[in-house]
Image: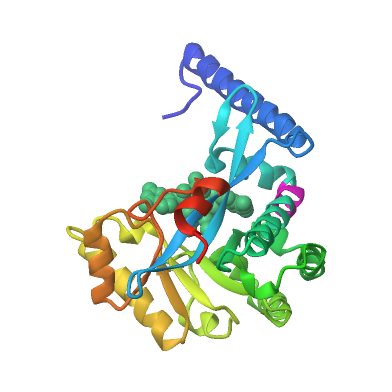
Amino acid sequence: QSKRQGSGGFQMYTEDMDAAAKERLELENDLRLALERDEFILFYQPQWDTQRGTLIGAEALLRWKHPKRGMVPPVQFIPVAEASGLINPIGEWVLKEACRQNKQWQESGLPPIRISVNLSIRQFEQPDLVDRVAQVLQSVQLEPAFIELEITESMAMDAERAIITLSSLKRLGVHISMDDFGTGYSSLSVLRRFPIDKLKIDRSFVRDFGDNQSNALIASTIIGMAHSLNLSVIAEGVETLEQVEFLRTLACYQVQGYYYSPPLPAEDFRTKFLKAI
Ligand code: C2E
Ligand code: MG
Ligand code: MG
Ligand code: MG
């Protein structure tokens, strides 16, 4: 059925479009100012080793404290940032801030951890990405091994180019993980050529293990794939003890999710998870 059917319907439709476009433009304009107004913050979510009962590291997740809208979730503003190109300076801020925070924790005598940072495809395709990452690490004086960059399967589309970028990043010494794994199209044959360290099982497959056979099967396939490629594997979105235990039966001992903790402000993360030894 056509949206044009009936003049009233059509008007509603265009008004909705106008509202959506206006909203988007407004968000983009505010986003443009957010960096200089210092409205971004990083939250940190622990990654847990269920076999040893120890902290593995943390994922840095971007938050935007909008002066009028309050906390805007990444699903709302990351797509706008991507479309407008603003994601490049924002992503660089994220990397710098995560490195700075990590270094500060290390300098205050806390046990060193690896912090992972999400890369957007626009960042990944910047020709000078590797130099930029190197420059940030250098300026903060953080050892590269304490940073992990999260890429997604969409960045593997141009496999040859991706392999070159990833190899340079690996040579620099940072770790690489493949985020939201299982939602894209990467084949085993392409994946095995990728110099990455870890697969992150997308949380959609961790959900309802109990009554969804195909989710359990996909998770178990990904875990098997990781093991055979000699990659580590972590499950995202783990919310229950049952999920932790099911993952353990599949020999997946790294988890991240609300069961352990939601993403936390830096200070809360430190007091809860980084008590000095
Ligand atoms: P992601 O990288 O897959 O991050 C995991 C998301 O799952 C986070 O959402 C986290 O809060 C959420 N999560 C963690 N544990 C659970 C759980 O047990 N249950 C459920 N239902 N959710 C859980 P968040 O922080 O809203 O971020 C959403 C997405 O936005 C991220 O997905 C990532 O793709 C993107 N994002 C966040 N920060 C950045 C950033 O600095 N740069 C870029 N390019 N993207 C970012
Ligand atoms: Mg991620
Ligand atoms: Mg992601
Ligand atoms: Mg993910």
Q: Position of residue 47 (x, y in %)?
A: 45, 63
Q: Nearer the viewer, residue 144 or 81?
A: 144
Q: Quadrant of residue 154?
A: bottom right
Q: Quadrant of residue 83?
A: top right
Q: Position of residue 42 (x, y in %)?
A: 60, 47
What residue appears at the point 51 percent right and 13 percent down from the top-left corner? 7
What residue appears at the point 56 percent right and 43 percent down from the top-left corner? 74
User: Residue 239: within the magenta?
Assistant: no
In the image, residue 133 above or below residue 193: above
What residue appears at the point 49 percent right and 51 percent down from the top-left corner? 271
Quadrant location, the N terminus: top left
- Which span of residues is magenta-colored? 87-92
Extreme-top residue of the structure: 8
Side of 212 where 115 appears, left or right: right
- Coloration of the structure image: rainbow
* Residue 157 showing in the rendered view: no
User: Residue 91: within the magenta?
Assistant: yes
In the image, residue 141 above or below residue 238: below
* Residue 181 showing in the rendered view: yes
Side of 32 where 274 appears, left or right: left
Q: Nearer the viewer, residue 2 or 230?
A: 230
> Of helix, strand and loop, which mostly describes the magenta segment?
helix
Q: Nearer the viewer, residue 196 or 174?
A: 174
Q: Position of residue 61 (x, y in %)?
A: 56, 50
Q: Quadrant of residue 122?
A: bottom right
Extreme-front residue of the structure: 277
What residue appears at the point 41 percent right and 65 percent down from the top-left corner? 48
Side of 41 where 136 appears, left or right: right
